[in-house]
Image: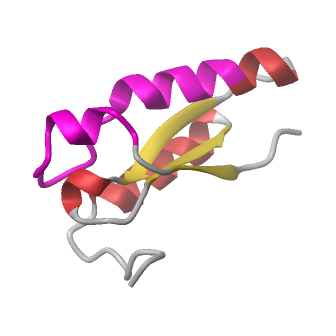
Amino acid sequence: DAGVFEVELRHPVMPTLVPQADRPVDQIMAGMIGSLFAHLTGWQLDAVQTDCPAVGRDAARFVVGPAEAVAAAEKWADAADRPPAHDA
């Protein structure tokens, strides 16, 4: 069974193009990360961005795992009452 893990990127490109936003802006990178790890592992994996410099975080963070787990992480990231970020 595939587990869930986090990928952290420092200084990603997309947030420099969109310096301020109310939600993470790098869906393209999420797709590439999910595809890369799916290819490397042979498992069906998805990815979602949960933190982003465009929303004031110190890095871009992505949750990678099976579709159900990634959907749950995406709901958490979209929730208005998010717990403090990793860098808080």
The front one of 85 and 70 is 85
Image position, residue 18 (x, y; %): 14, 39
Q: Is the C terminus in the top left, top right, bottom left or bottom right quadrant?
A: bottom left
Image position, residue 19 (x, y; %): 14, 47
Residue 14 placement, left or right of 43: left
Quarter of the view holding residue 56? bottom left
Question: Residue 14 in magenta?
Answer: yes
Residue at 59% in and 41% down: 68
Question: Residue 32 in magenta?
Answer: yes
Q: Is the N terminus in the top left, top right, bottom left or bottom right quadrant?
A: top right
The front one of 72 and 58 is 58
The front one of 63 and 20 is 20
Q: In this view, does 22 lie above or below 11?
A: below
Magenta segment: 12-36
Image position, residue 15 (x, y; %): 25, 42
Q: Which colour scheme is used?
A: secondary structure
Residue at 58% in and 28% down: 33
Residue at 35% in and 30% down: 27
Quarter of the view holding residue 78? bottom left
Residue 52 placement, left or right of 80: right
Image position, residue 34 (x, y; %): 60, 27
Quarter of the view holding residue 16? top left
The front one of 8 and 38 is 8
